[in-house]
Amino acid sequence: MSWLDDPLDDEDEPLYDESDVRIRPNPKGNRPRTKRRPAHEDATIARVLGVDRGRYAVLAGEDTPEEHQLTATRARELRKTPIVTGDRARIVGDTSGEEGTLARIVGIEERTSLLRRSADDTDQVERVIVANADQMLVVVAAADPEPRPRLVDRYLIAALDAGIRPLMVVTKTDLADPAPFLRHFEGLADLRVFFSARDETPVDTIGEALIGHSTVFVGHSGVGKSTLVNALVPTAGRATGHVNEVTGRGRHTSSSTVSLRYHGQGGSGWVIDTPGVRSFGLGHVDPANILRAYRDLEDVAEQCPRGCTHLADAPDCALNEAVAEGRLPAARVDSLQRLLATFKDRTDY
């Protein structure tokens, strides 16, 4: 008998019931997705020491008997948030630091400072170097490689823009007299300068300036920055290189930015070592901060007519008049004018 010969009546059982309805399972779990994120009120605050291939070395319990280092990854909601050395991160999960464990970074505390650079002066995309530093130690060699005052000017502008106090160490003073180079900065009375020779590094004197501070070390490749870091932090193990005899350029040795604890007789501080660079773009900097970095020139520029561009062809510019009269070093004013010329057509500030 076919099904046509045996129709269902009202008392017959139905062919299907609700249990036969097939529901597509949620491939990401049974709970529906939501944009609400947990507050993570139990999160621990930790210092970011460095990053390597998506894994962050962080220090939890800083300055307490429970201080320990652990590894963490970032939470999905932070995938577009830059996390850099020096950040104060909020971490959850397994924070024991035992081998094989992995915590998770779920937030970043408000930063007190942010040191940045760009690929060049026209690039608006900023590259974050370090967070929460309050000092910058510019390392420059008296020779081998030759000092580059304009690069140092850029460091000083970036430091001022970030609200960071600059310091300077001149290395390899046994190879050349640093006085001609330092004349470029003689108007900066508040710039503290240290001197280091091949066999005479003032570790204790420099170290005193690091106590109680988070200091980011910057410098051209080959100036001896990694050597200085190793002298200050013997356990650092930062790779050192040499200067190419043909090109006069240093070889990049530090490949990542890391925070290292400095221990001195009067206390401790943080040394943040960065990779050596041959250029330091200021595309992210407000041009108004450029002249402020040349504090000695800023005082003279106050005598300029209103709206003065301070460029080489600016009429009645007090800076140009001071150079002509021998009251200001021509090279230093030229350095300022080159930077101002780069930024004169910018309209994004």
Image (spheres, helix red, strand yellow):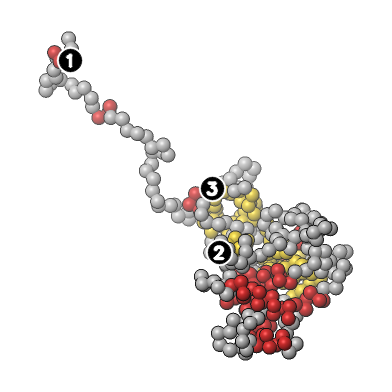
Mark 1, other Cα within 10 Å: few <14 / some 14–19 / many ≥20? few
Q: Are marks 3 and 2 in contact (CB under 8 Å)?
A: no
Q: Nearer the viewer, mark 3 or mark 2?
A: 2
In the rendered image, is residue 275 in sight? Answer: yes
Amino acid at circle 3: Gly
* Residue name at image x 71 percent, y 62 percent: 278
Q: In which quarter of the view is residue 8 placed?
A: top left
Q: In which quarter of the view is residue 253 placed?
A: bottom right
Instruction: Describe residue 229's horizontal placement relative to residue 53 as left or right.
Output: right
Q: Are marks 1 and 2 in contact (CB under 8 Å)?
A: no
Nearer the observer, 92 or 287 = 287
Mark 3, other Cα within 10 Å: few <14 / some 14–19 / many ≥20? some
Question: Label for residue 3?
Answer: 1
Residue 157, position as x, y percentages in the image: 64, 72
Question: Label for residue 124?
Answer: 2
Mark found first going from the N terminus, 1 or 2:
1
Residue with the mark numbered 3: 93
Mark found first going from the N terminus, 1 or 3:
1
Residue 294, position as x, y percentages in the image: 66, 79
Disc 3 on helix, strand or loop?
strand
* Residue name at image x 18 percent, y 12 percent: 2
Nearer the observer, 345 or 48 = 345
Q: Nearer the viewer, mark 1 or mark 2?
A: 2
Above/below status of 252 relative to 344: above
Mark found first going from the N terminus, 3 or 2:
3
Above/below status of 176 relative to 3: below
